[in-house]
Amino acid sequence: MNHAMSGPHSDLPLDTVLERLKLTAARPFEDARPIPPEVHHSHTFLEHERGTVFMQEWICVGRSDEIEGHGDYLTHDIAGVPVVVVRQADGGVKAFVNACAHRFSRLLANETGSGRKITCPYHAWTYDCAGKLIRAPYMEMKEGFDASKHGLRPLHVEVWEGFVYVTLADEPAKPVARSLMSLRDNIVGRYDMACYRTVMRETMIWNANWKNLIENFSESYHVPIAHGKTFARHAKKPEDYVCGEDSDHYSYHRAAQPSDERPGAAHSANTRLEGEWRRTMVDFCVFPSHLVTLMPDYLWYISVQPAGADQMRATWGVAVPPEVLADVSDEEYDTWVSDFRTYMDTANGEDKPLVEALHLGTASPLLPNGALHPIERNLWQFTRYLARVCVA
């Protein structure tokens, strides 16, 4: 598939696309319509959102427990900028552009790893975990070379509820914790996501716009129809879902399943959750691109990036609370993880053709007006967010 393909929406002027996004976002929810198709397909809008969204906003790069030890690291790519996050000796976390301060070769190729030093494979310039240049072979031949002025380029980083966020902005508009205070205090804080332990991490590439996955994840209207092999088995009905308050920074919906006796409910040793929350799922999106299904017995997160107007890259992972993990013996662990991965692969396999079909459908020059179901309020909230950050 040609991911630089052109269509009726691909080459529209940016002003036209922004005006249509603005008009759609201005509609009240009762008369809401889907994101305009040109917002998914316009090449000029893709470049615009890279600057206004991905170069400015906080982006999830993974889980804090993936980098527990001094020198453990995660790499990620944000809007074409290679990023590395490293655990420090004092337990803190620092983030840098994953490029050598010499001639900008990418330093770390693996998605995860560990090492007290970071050495460039090209000319062996070497940095400590704090980004300081500690070795530059033969640079004493350059008069006046000052190693202290040639460290790695730092980036802002923040850990919230066990998730690691990085922003490329020189001056972030607002800390993650402050932006998500209401979400934590009123909804997700009771789960203590930071105690969940990561058991898998994968990256997938789908032939769709990154926003198509945000749309799909942000509504559970499709679950009874599309997820018969996986999530539909929790037996939640559309009328069970409650959509959360409007926010500039997040959206969510939640629903309780009917029974405490099936997967999706809290373990008997879980002392954090009470009442209906012991069997309640929360699906939330931290704008722009961090998606989480949070359940009493596991969480599934996805961090989405555009790889073009017609392709997206998504890093996803699964984490489980300690009381669930305690029930898995060392002998059973590999099989248990393999079975869990098969389940998640099945769920992704159910979603992939639908998300790609959504992208293909919106490429049409002729479309109906569109409409949203009452439990699709999160899609309207995301459209409003996108217009707020993209339309001057």
Image (cartoon, grey):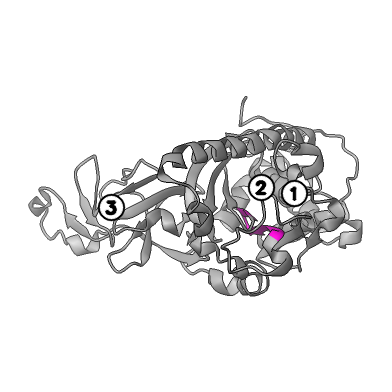
Of the image marks 2 and 1, the number of the one nearer the N terminus: 1
Q: Can you tell which quarter of the image residue 148 is in?
A: bottom left
Label 3 crowd bin: few (<14), some (14–19), many (20+), radius 10 Å: many
| Quadrant of the drawing holding the N terminus | top right
Horizontal placement of 122 versus 281: left or right?
Answer: left
Q: CA distance from mark 2 to mark 3?
A: 32 Å
Between residues 235 and 82, which one lies in front from this camera angle? Answer: 235
Between residues 200 and 273, which one lies in front from this camera angle? Answer: 273
Q: CA distance from mark 1 to mark 3?
A: 38 Å
Residue type highlighted by circle 3: Ala
Residue type highlighted by circle 2: Phe
Of the image marks 2 and 3, the number of the one nearer the N terminus: 2
**Mark 2 element type:** helix
At 44% across and 59% down in the image, what residue appears? 64
Does the magenta portion include 53?
no
Horizontal placement of 50 versus 34: left or right?
Answer: left
Per the rendered image, the range of residues in magenta is: 279-293
Q: Which residue is mark 3?
A: 101
| Quadrant of the drawing holding the C terminus | bottom right
Label tally: 3
Residue type highlighted by circle 1: Val
Q: Can you tell which quarter of the image residue 334 is in?
A: top left
